[in-house]
C-alpha cells in the first residue's frame, strides 16, 4: 500500500478491514505503524502501561496468514488497546495499582479471548485510574494520562488510557470499562466514540471488579460503525459470568441505516444541571436541531430521580468496592508487605499497595455496610436506584431513546480537581444514571468549545444497542466532528 504510516493510522477500523481483505494493506504493516506511533508519542501522552510488542507482531503475522487463506473475521488484524483491568495471559494486568504490580493472570478475560479468536492484534495494556476509580486518569499509581487535544488537560477517567490511545491514533480501537461513566466521559473528553452496553450484554469474566452490579465492558472507536464492529465481536452470553444475558445479539452494523425519520428522541430537563459550561450547552443545543433536521421528533420527558443518582452511586459503588477489594490482602492477591502479625501484614500490604482514592472509596463503602448504617445507607440507596430505573422505564413508553450531554464541561486542567473529590465526582453527573439503571449509552462527538471536544450521549432501553448506535451514526454522518484530529495525531 502506498500510504505513509501516518495515513495508515488515520484509517477507521471499517476502512482497514476493507484494505486488509483486499490485500492493499498487511496486518504487519498496520501493526508496525501503530507501534511506531506509540514509540514516538506515548512518552508525552502516557496512554500505555505495557506495550505488547512481540505479541502484537506475532498476532499480525498470524492475521496475515488467515487473510491469505480467506479466513478473516471482522477483527482479524485490527490493532486494539486493552484497559489494564482486563486479564491477559500474555501480559501483566495491574489495574494501575502498586498492589498488583507485575501480576500476570493465568487466563484471559472473555472479551480478550473473543478478540483473540477473531485474530485481533493486541498493542498493549492501557492506563487507567487505579482499579477504575476516578474521573480524570490522574489516580494511576504509575503515571497520569494526558489529553491528546491539550496535554495540560485530563483525558477523563477511569478509561483515560484507552480513550487517549484511540484519539492520538496509537490504537485503532480499544476496550474500556464503564462503572459510572468511565467509557463515555473519557470518550467525550478525547473526542472519540465510546459505548457502554447494557449490563449483561458483554461478559465481565476476567474484569478486575470495582462494583459488580455496575461494571460493564465496552469499546472506544473513531466512528460509530467501528464501535458497532467491536461490540459485535465481544457481545453475547458467557457461561463463566452468572450476570451475562442470554439475549441474542443482533447485527449491529446492519442497523446503521442513516435513517432516523419518525423516531422519538427524549430530552430531559434534568440533564441541564447547574455548572454546565456555555460552550457545552451551545454544542448540545445545535445537535438537537440536527436531530430534528434528520426527521426525529424531540419529546420532552421527566426523569425526576436523576438528581439522586450521584449520591446513590457513591454509596452503592464504594460498598461493592469494599467487598471486592477485600481479596487484595497479600495472601490471596496482592504483593506482600510482611510483618510480625497477620493483621499488620494486611495493614502494610493495603497501606502501601492502594492509592488515596481507592482507600477513600474502601472506607466509604465499609462505613455504608457497617452495622447500624447498612439499612440507613446501602438499603436506602438500592431503593432509590429502583426509582431511577423506573423513571427510565416510564420514559421508554414515550420515546425510542434519550439524548443528553456526556459531561457538563470539557476536559479540565490536570490537577484542577485532585484536592476536591466532590468536584471530581461531578464530572460523571450525566453518565451515572445509565449505570444505575443498567441501560446502554453511546457517547459521540458533537462539537468543540475552547478548542476541546464536546460530546453527547444517546441512551436507550435495555438491549437496545442497535437503536442508539443507529441514532448516533445518523448524527455522525451529517457532521464533521469525527474527522477532526488532535494536533498530536495529525503531526505524529
Image (cartoon, grey):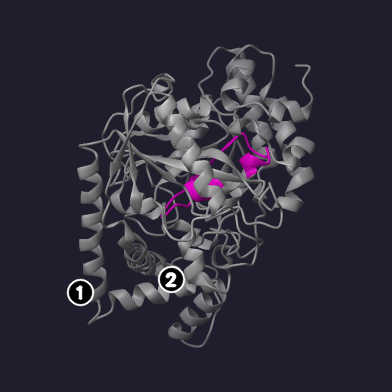
Q: Which residue is mark 1?
A: 375
Is residue 180 in the magenta section? yes
Element class at badge 1: helix
Residue 372 position, x and y percent, is 22, 82
Q: Residues within 10 Å of mark 2 (few under 14, many from 20)?
A: many
Q: Is residue 353 above or below residue 219?
A: below
Residue 463 position, x and y percent, is 30, 36
The picture quadrant where one finds residue 223 is top right
Q: Is residue 90 above or below residue 262?
A: below
Quadrant position of the N terminus in the picture: top right
Label annotation for residue 54 = none
Q: Is residue 387 above or below residue 400?
A: below
Q: Which residue is mark 2?
A: 361
Q: Which residues are magenta?
A: 165-188
The picture quadrant where one finds residue 93 is bottom right
The picture quadrant where one finds residue 418 is bottom right
Residue 187 position, x and y percent, is 54, 45
Q: Residue at x 52, y 33 (%)?
A: 116
Q: Residue at x 41, y 77 (%)?
A: 363
Q: Is residue 304 above or below residue 394?
A: below
Q: Relative to 54, is 372 on the left or the right?
A: left
Q: Residue at x 20, y 37 (%)?
A: 397
User: Residue 233, can we see it?
Assistant: no
Q: Earlier in the sequence, mark 2 or mark 1?
A: 2
User: Label 2, label 1: how many angstroms apart (C-alpha)?
Assistant: 19 Å
Amino acid at each position: 500500500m502506498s500510504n505513509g504510516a501516518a495515513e495508515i493510522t488515520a484509517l477507521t477500523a471499517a476502512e482497514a478491514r476493507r484494505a486488509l481483505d483486499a490485500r492493499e494493506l498487511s496486518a504487519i504493516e498496520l501493526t508496525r505503524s501503530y507501534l511506531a506511533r506509540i514509540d514516538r508519542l506515548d512518552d508525552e501522552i502516557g496512554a500505555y502501561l505495557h506495550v505488547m510488542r512481540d505479541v502484537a507482531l506475532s498476532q499480525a503475522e498470524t492475521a496475515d496468514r488467515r487473510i491469505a487463506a480467506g479466513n478473516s473475521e471482522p477483527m482479524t488484524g485490527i490493532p486494539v488497546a486493552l484497559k489494564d483491568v482486563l486479564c491477559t495471559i500474555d501480559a501483566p494486568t495491574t489495574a494501575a495499582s502498586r498492589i498488583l504490580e507485575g501480576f500476570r493472570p493465568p487466563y484471559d478475560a472473555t472479551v480478550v479471548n473473543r478478540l483473540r479468536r477473531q485474530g485481533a492484534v493486541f498493542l498493549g495494556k492501557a492506563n487507567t485510574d487505579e482499579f477504575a476509580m476516578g474521573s480524570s486518569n490522574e489516580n494511576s499509581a504509575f503515571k497520569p494520562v494526558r489529553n491528546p487535544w491539550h496535554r495540560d488537560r485530563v483525558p477523563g477517567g477511569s478509561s483515560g488510557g484507552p480513550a487517549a490511545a484511540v484519539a492520538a491514533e496509537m490504537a485503532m480501537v480499544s476496550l474500556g470499562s464503564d462503572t459510572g461513566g468511565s467509557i463515555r466521559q473519557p470518550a467525550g473528553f478525547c473526542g472519540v466514540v465510546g459505548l457502554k452496553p447494557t449490563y449483561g450484554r458483554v461478559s465481565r469474566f476476567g474484569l478486575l471488579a470495582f462494583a459488580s452490579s455496575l461494571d460493564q465492558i465496552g469499546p472506544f472507536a473513531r466512528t460509530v460503525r467501528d464501535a458497532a464492529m467491536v461490540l459485535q465481536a465481544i457481545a453475547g452470553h458467557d457461561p463463566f459470568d452468572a450476570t451475562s444475558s442470554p439475549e441474542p445479539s443482533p447485527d449491529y452494523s446492519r442497523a446503521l441505516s442513516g435513517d432516523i425519520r419518525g423516531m422519538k428522541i427524549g430530552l430531559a430537563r434534568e440533564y441541564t444541571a447547574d455548572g454546565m459550561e456555555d460552550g457545552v450547552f451551545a454544542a448540545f443545543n445545535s445537535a438537537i436541531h440536527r436531530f430534528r433536521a434528520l426527521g426525529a421528533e424531540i419529546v420532552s420527558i421527566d426523569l425526576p430521580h436523576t438528581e439522586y443518582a450521584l449520591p446513590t452511586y457513591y454509596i452503592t459503588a464504594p460498598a461493592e468496592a469494599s467487598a471486592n477489594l477485600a481479596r487484595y490482602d497479600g495472601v490471596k492477591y496482592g504483593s506482600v508487605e510482611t510483618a510480625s502479625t497477620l493483621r499488620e501484614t494486611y495493614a502494610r500490604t493495603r497501606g502501601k499497595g492502594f492509592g488515596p482514592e481507592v482507600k477513600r472509596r474502601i472506607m466509604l463503602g465499609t462505613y455504608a455496610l457497617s452495622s447500624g448504617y447498612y439499612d440507613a445507607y446501602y438499603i436506602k440507596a438500592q431503593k432509590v436506584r429502583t426509582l431511577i430505573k423506573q423513571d427510565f422505564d416510564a420514559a421508554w413508553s414515550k420515546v425510542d431513546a434519550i439524548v443528553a450531554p456526556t459531561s457538563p464541561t470539557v476536559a479540565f486542567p490536570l490537577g484542577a480537581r485532585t484536592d476536591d473529590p466532590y468536584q471530581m465526582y461531578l464530572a460523571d453527573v450525566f453518565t451515572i444514571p445509565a449505570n444505575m439503571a443498567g441501560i446502554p449509552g453511546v457517547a459521540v462527538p458533537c462539537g468543540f468549545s475552547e478548542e476541546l471536544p464536546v460530546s453527547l450521549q444517546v441512551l436507550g432501553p435495555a438491549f437496545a444497542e442497535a437503536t442508539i448506535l443507529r441514532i448516533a451514526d445518523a448524527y455522525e454522518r451529517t457532521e464533521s466532528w469525527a474527522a477532526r484530529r488532535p494536533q498530536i495525531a495529525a503531526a505524529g
